[in-house]
Image (cartoon, rainbow, N blue to C red):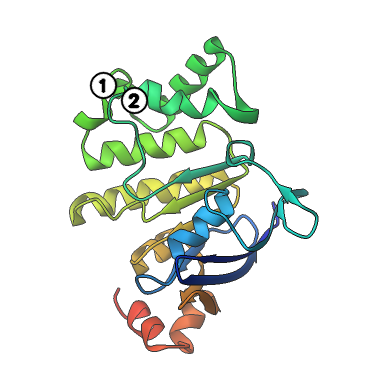
Amino acid sequence: MTAWSASVTVSAGGFDLALSIEGDDTPVALIGPNGSGKTTALRAIAGAVAVSDARVEIGNRVLDCTEREIQVPMQDRGIGYVPQGYGLFPHLTVMENVEFGLTVGARRDSATSRTERVGAMLSRLGCESLAHRRVDRLSGGEQQRVALARALVMEPDMLLLDEPLAALDATRRRAVRLFLAEQLSAFGRPCILVTHDVRDVLALGATVVVLEEGAVSQTGSLEALRTSPASDFVREFVATD
C-alpha cells in the first residue's frame, strides 16, 4: 500500500487554491462546482502549473517541497496524467501516442522495449487492433482507452484522471465506467479522479474530497457525505444517483 500526501497553494490570474489531502491506494474522487480548482489541483500535483507553496510526496519520494527548494520536473515525477479531452496527439497513431511517455524523462526506454510494452498494454486494454490507426479517427470510448494506456504504460506511481468519462454519451459511459473500475483495481496504486458524477464514485469505491472556492470543504466516504453534507453542493451531488 502506497501512502501519499499533497499540499499545494496556487495563486494565478486572480484565482487562489489551497489544497491539502492524503491517501493510500483507495481512489480519491475530487468533486466540486465548476471553477472550484479541481483541474488546477491535478495540474499542480502533476507539476504542470506554477505553485506558490507546495509539498507533494508519494511513498518515500518528495516531488515538491518549496521549503527545501525541491521541484521534480513533470516528466520525471512518475505520474500518469490524463487531462480533459484525453490530450492525445491527433496526427499520430495509437501506437505512437501510447509510447510517447517512454521516449522522454526518467522512464525513457529503448525502441525494442517500448514496442513490447506498448503492445502488451494495448492488448491488456483490448485495443491492440487500433495500434496503427490515427487517434482522430477513433470513437470517444476508444480514445479514452488509448489515453489510459498511455498513462499506464509508464507504470506510474500515481494516476491523475480529469473527468475521463465526460466526453462519452450515457450508454458508452456506463460500459467505460466499469472498464475503468477494473483497470484501477488492477493498477493498485494511488489515483485521483475529477468527476461530476456520483456513479463514478460508487463504481470506484472512492474516498471523496470536496473542493469549493479553492479549498477543501469536506472529505469522507460517499455514505458519510450523504449522512452529513457540508454544503448545498454536496447535498445535490449525493442525491443525483
Who's the residue at 23% across and 50% down the image?
Answer: 168
Residue 86 x, y percent position in the rendering: 35, 43
Specify the amino acid type for callout 2: Val
Is 239 above or below relative to 30? below
Is 94 above or below relative to 24? above
Instruction: Label 1, secondary structure: give it.
Output: loop
Residue tagged by mark 1? 133
Is 116 above or below relative to 227? above
Is 15 above or below relative to 105? below
Residue 215 x, y percent position in the rendering: 53, 76
Q: Earlier in the sequence, mark 2 or mark 1?
A: 2
Question: Residue 185 versus residue 133: which sits nearer the camera?
Answer: 133
Question: Residue 211 versus residue 27: which sits nearer the camera?
Answer: 211
Residue tagged by mark 2? 94
Question: Residue 174 versus residue 57: which sits nearer the camera?
Answer: 57
Indicate left or right for 95 with 153 as reference. Answer: left
Quadrant of the image for the C terminus?
bottom left
Question: Residue 32 versus residue 125: which sits nearer the camera?
Answer: 32
Picture quadrant where residue 156 is located? top right
Specify the amino acid type for callout 1: Arg
CB contact under 8 Å: marks 2 and 1: yes
Who's the residue at 53% across and 58% down the image?
Answer: 27
